[in-house]
Amino acid sequence: MLQAVNEPRVGAAEVVRESHLAAFRFMLRARLLDDKFAALYRTGKIHGGVFLGRGQEALSAALGVSLKKTDVFAPLIRDAAGRLAFGEPILDAVRNYLGSALGPMRGRDGNVHRGRPRDGYLPMISHLGAMISVVNGVLFARRFKNISGMVGAACLGDGATSTGAFHEALNQAAVEKLPLVVVVADNQYAYSTPTDRQFACESLADKGVGYGVASHTVDATDLTACLKIVGGAVAQARAGNGPQLVVAKLLRLCGHGEHDDANYIIPELKNSALGRDCLKVAEEFLLRNKFTDAAQLAVWRSETIREIEEAVAQVQREPAPDPYAENWSAISSEHLNETHLENGH
Amino acid sequence: MLQAVNEPRVGAAEVVRESHLAAFRFMLRARLLDDKFAALYRTGKIHGGVFLGRGQEALSAALGVSLKKTDVFAPLIRDAAGRLAFGEPILDAVRNYLGSALGPMRGRDGNVHRGRPRDGYLPMISHLGAMISVVNGVLFARRFKNISGMVGAACLGDGATSTGAFHEALNQAAVEKLPLVVVVADNQYAYSTPTDRQFACESLADKGVGYGVASHTVDATDLTACLKIVGGAVAQARAGNGPQLVVAKLLRLCGHGEHDDANYIIPELKNSALGRDCLKVAEEFLLRNKFTDAAQLAVWRSETIREIEEAVAQVQREPAPDPYAENWSAISSEHLNETHLENGH
Amino acid sequence: MATEITYIDAIREAQAHALRDDPRVFIYGQDVAAFGGAFKATKNLAKEFPGRVFDSPISEDAMVGFAVGAAIEGLRPIIEMQFADFSTVGFNQIVNQAATLFWRTGVPCPITVRLPFGGTSGGGPFHSQSLETIYAHYPGLIVLTPATVEDAYSMLLEAVAIDDPVIFCEHKFLYRHLKAEKLPTEALPVGKARIARVGRDLTIVAYSAMVQDALEAANELLTEGWEVEVVDLRSVKPLDTDTVMASVARTGKLLCVGESWPWGGVTAEVIARVASEGYGLLDAPPQRLNAKDTPVPYHPNLWAAHRPTVRAVAAAARKILRS
Amino acid sequence: MATEITYIDAIREAQAHALRDDPRVFIYGQDVAAFGGAFKATKNLAKEFPGRVFDSPISEDAMVGFAVGAAIEGLRPIIEMQFADFSTVGFNQIVNQAATLFWRTGVPCPITVRLPFGGTSGGGPFHSQSLETIYAHYPGLIVLTPATVEDAYSMLLEAVAIDDPVIFCEHKFLYRHLKAEKLPTEALPVGKARIARVGRDLTIVAYSAMVQDALEAANELLTEGWEVEVVDLRSVKPLDTDTVMASVARTGKLLCVGESWPWGGVTAEVIARVASEGYGLLDAPPQRLNAKDTPVPYHPNLWAAHRPTVRAVAAAARKILRS
Ligand SMILES: Cc1ncc(C[n+]2csc(CCOP(=O)(O)OP(=O)(O)O)c2C)c(N)n1
Ligand SMILES: Cc1ncc(C[n+]2csc(CCOP(=O)(O)OP(=O)(O)O)c2C)c(N)n1
Ligand SMILES: [Mg+2]
Ligand SMILES: [Mg+2]
């Protein structure tokens, strides 16, 4: 797991190499996994939406590798990389998309709505902004139990900063001085809505001061910058310096979901520096700096593809949820279940 | 009505005198009216809560006199002065507190929940922050109808800045570039909650930049400052420079409501400059600058008291709402009324 | 206009019609402008009606508050929620601002809040909810639930014309599932239920997508010799008790079907009214069928079992018919 | 402990008890710490339990989200809404975050949301609402409505112990109106209704403050020779249909009374259940009585007429008894 890259020490160069390679591998795995979901979607194998993190892998992976397993993580829809880096098995992701009864949500919820709350890995509800205060509560509880040194990260997009939930939760974290890191992926659009219909500040990072929260800006097409800035923000939070707001600039390199061809994204943005593919940028960086070589990259790629294919093949043989075996109750207290409601009367 | 004081012109000194006197008279009227409500409350004549603006009159009056009758105004619980300055008759206020059938809310709603929406004077609902987006809608509608030159003002307290509604609405106004002025009375407490449990920024004015909104700070114990800063913000909005955030510093010189003795307000604050009574400060200023004299002040006071007493006497003779004559329907489309629901089945 | 008109087309056309006929109408919501809405309900409208269809930030609370302000000034806003489920974060402005305005001040609040609602396979717990009950429970709102292409069109037009806040529940499953030849020029007014099928043995009361399931169940039962009457409520608030009662008077038997959760709600309200006021008309206990009391599941197998199916409706009907 | 214990005292004592016995319990809400809460339900608790009772910003959405997060970590948060009415801005976190957590993930969500609710004279439209229906309609929540000092105490204690999110509806009118000699050591479990008064002629089902009105009406009717049974539901979700049905089996007649709005809700649910499952037990049409379908009025005259009065309950009962 990454040691904060902005604290050089003996063997710093090696640490930098390691951290880049670790993050890159999660980026690659996420990209290939996303590609597979897109392919499954096109062939009608996935019910409901498919949401990709294409272009956001550097940011998401940098966050994931900056977190420890004992931290708290509330990813959003474009965080396949961060999820993998935080420890999610590919199998969980595949199971959730395909609705396997063995998946983390047992077919009850799907696609990006997955997590393991007991492991500090929170499964998003769809309502944007709603997970941040939940992270606050987890962090508070740990402090209450005298656990220290942990960090909680919550991800969201530019559009989600317009929600009341975001505001209330960031303010709450500031008041409670919680080790929260909010990572905003400003990818220029919320679904089809461009940022000028979403906010009027110069940069979303300008919001920090109004909460009494440190803020950071990062070019999310550049893995090195992400590792430094995101890693730094996580280190700041861990060190007890209160909530941190990271605003990352990038472009969504796909539709909102796979049903969307995103023809509204203007060419100027596609052709700008923001439109670079962080995966390619990182790959070139690794090769240029001889952190690895093309042969190794090819191995990683093919190994991952095999792993993904195997996972998909396995999950496709797994049982679908059985409505007759299903426990149709929304509460855990069995003695409070109403037989009257079980079958909708 | 006040012409913006920060635009000196021929006879500027006279304009300053006039504006101070106009605002002061509303402050005085508000204070005396509030005192009467407090007295009525103590003798059990008012059902429900009584909420005073003591200490907030300079800010509220300055806002009220800066608005034109054709503007939009959404006051909150401590804005008796602003309401009067915006044109609310004392009679409306008294009728609303006493629940008269002839009052603006006809006894259906009470105390500070009053207004005349068709006159741009919006009756608050209790949910803090909820009125700001309504002001936005009114401003938008007027622009849609090609009416220009208007301003909309929404008032709230330090505590209400923690609501999601405040955030969404201020952002919305910024995106739509509406002539909105949000006036935050930072009176150090939200009910009993001190500001350090409410927010962690240095000043609430720091929030402006994160919305792309101009922000202004004012000492609300000083009428002159209020006229200048609030009047200036209103003028900025009117001139088309987008939403304005005014953060006023003061201390609440009463309980949250009249049921509350506010023993939690710390002496340090009471004894600080913030603890000054803006009405006394203004009175001294007027006398010192010979804007008026003590005799005149006494006349204003006694005239107002008589006016208030007359209003109360009149309203006490007015009919209370009659449940049998009441139209127990919540919708205006009579043909869609359900007789089944009229009597709760 | 196309020769085959879907339910979503009808919703688009009704909005185009309203924008054309009434200069006070505008549309505000996430992605409704150039993009034409997540479901394409506002396709091309921003181009056809410049300045009158525009995108909002992801701020449901402020969206509704904004609409109320505009309504106060005499405009007729249509608000699109991207999914009904997200209206929970605009809930307060709907139930406490919009719904109380007229009663408190005498100033009407003619806003239409469009809620793409109801379940679809793969939608999951947060893109499938049926929220008619929570809005109908609060005083001050009109809650509409069109079940046909024609009603989607005429009721949305009427919704915009109504002087009160209307919660317009448009079922996502019907969007592309239902088709009609042409748009109606005449329609039953809001507040009147419709006899979707005549029968003498049993009354099934349904609304929105469940009307289709009720009709299919009725077809199935016909092969067994039962003639089932299907009442489409169209509007759950106001609720046309008279039409329901008249039907029950003819059939003596009642089954009420809804896609929302079982506790409270439309089916409870219908049965309670009939039991209280039409007790003598019944010759068997009235029954109800709803979704199960859990969030709406993601997996198609679970989803299909969560809501009442045609088979479940038919089975429940059979039980009453044989009692 | 005082010799006269009020309903609000009971709520305070239950919280003190929970804090004392269970180190996982904490209280979070506006003004709950040094101030002791708007209604003094947490008086002195911050002092007695340092670090475990603390003030929140005016952020209902974040308050509930925070509680869910703490619950995931095994704590047992009690959230005080200053008034039930303000829970509408925390609605989404309650119904979509707290209520779905267990079903989605298998991880329980033991939070208690205290809602000071119901009407008081002069409260007006935004400090008087009864919201049990909107919470009971959503799957995943337990909704409690204690009607006595004893139940306020024992049910709140049980609420904190329950592994699911509990909406605890405590009636503001009862706060200082009801008194008891001492706190109970034993109690009916949550989920069981209580026969508040035995009678053979008619069953009145009520909950929360309306139980008192029902009992008074029963007294009035006794002078006319009628023996009315009063069932106190205690919990509206789960709803103890068995106890209601058993009572109706004895009396053959049912009136259901609630203080909330008439469309949908507890009274509709109770009547629909009895009509469906206990049809043969009834020898008169079941009836219901609710508040009127408008916001709750401010003026005492209007307020008193808006909710069911003792006189209205008695009148409705008489009508059934004479039918
Ligand atoms: C409260 C709420 N309103 C609306 C939606 C529907 N919705 C889902 S994703 C999305 C756009 C999100 O944009 P952004 O936050 O910028 O994230 P991105 O998709 O660009 O990563 C919208 C409007 C939602 N999920 N929640
Ligand atoms: C959403 C919401 N939550 C809670 C309340 C209850 N409440 C009414 S006034 C108040 C304190 C307001 O404080 P502040 O905004 O600072 O205004 P002040 O009273 O100090 O003028 C609270 C918590 C409310 N009205 N709305
Ligand atoms: Mg985005
Ligand atoms: Mg304050």
Image (cartoon, coloured by chain):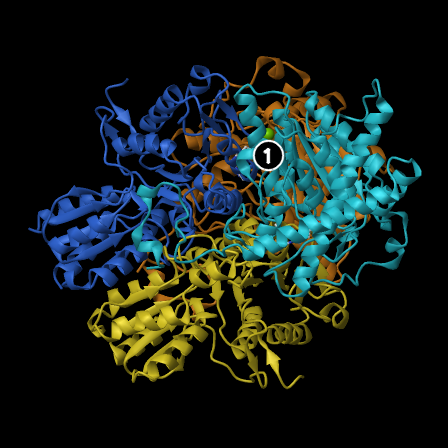
Chain colours: A orange, B cyan, C blue, D yellow
Residue named by callout 1: B135
Q: Secondary structure at mark 1?
A: helix
Residue D278 % position (x, y): 24, 70
Q: Quadrant of the N terminus of chain C?
A: top left
Residue A123 % position (x, y): 56, 48
**Vertical relation: D39 (above or below) B238:** below
- Pick whichever, A282 or C273, lies toward us: C273
Q: Chain of mark 1?
A: B
Binning the other alpha carbons within 10 Å of mark 1 as few (below 14), some (14 to 19) or many (20 upward) gives many
- Pick whichever, B254 or D24, lies toward us: B254
Residue D64 appears in which quarter of the rendering? bottom right
**Vertical relation: D202 (above or below) D31:** below
- Pick whichever, A98 or C25, lies toward us: C25
Query: Relative to B99, is C39 on the left or the right?
Result: left
Q: Quadrant of the C terminus of chain C?
A: bottom left
Residue B44 appears in which quarter of the rendering? bottom right
